[in-house]
Amino acid sequence: MIPALSDLTAMGRALVLAEAAGRAGEVPVGAIVTDAAGVVIGEGQNLRELEHDPTAHAEVVAMRRAAASVGSWNLTGCTLTVTLEPCLMCAGTLLQAHVSRLVFGAWDEKAGAAGSMYDVVRDRRLPARAEVVPGVREGEASALLRTFFAARRG
């Protein structure tokens, strides 16, 4: 699937957020939520270490901020763009928020829930599903993660 220009631009912003997370000692993951018109209504980066919060993944932070921005938990028509394939928690949150589209960069072979380990966001047994656009700027997103973890092992 060829990503739309808006998906490439959105991923660019998510990558900037991921870089900031990495500089702060967090796993470098960034996410943004855009509305149906492509306007950014929420953004986030991993904040688990800073906030001592196991749920402070970039996706959850971005969706919380988007929901606060629009004054509703319901994000139907919105797109979540994130540098790393969401985990089960984030995929479940995406479905609970009724996010319509998911765009992600790097695959997460160990914990991904949008096509690698699991495919929760497209599971027909669930009442909500999302369109998935994987691998957008995958090389850049993967490189951020590889560099971060290599430095930690170093």
Image (cartoon, rainbow, N blue to C red):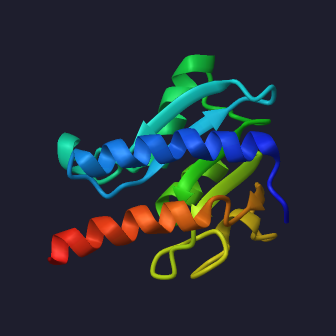
Residue occupying image coordinates x 80% and y 55%: 3
Q: Is residue 130 left or right of residue 108?
A: right
Residue occupying image coordinates x 50% and y 33%: 43
Q: Residue furthest left?
A: 154
Residue occupying image coordinates x 61% and y 47%: 11
Q: Is residue 49 left or right of residue 31?
A: left
Residue 33: image location, x then y, percent: 61, 36
Front in this rendered view, residue 119 or 140: 140
Q: Is residue 66 above or below residue 147?
A: above
Residue 154: image location, x then y, percent: 14, 77
Q: Is residue 89 left or right of residue 69?
A: left
Residue 14: image location, x then y, percent: 52, 44
Front in this rendered view, residue 112 or 30: 30
Front in this rendered view, residue 39 or 141: 141
In the picture, residue 133 is in which quadrant?
bottom right
Residue 38: image location, x then y, percent: 75, 29
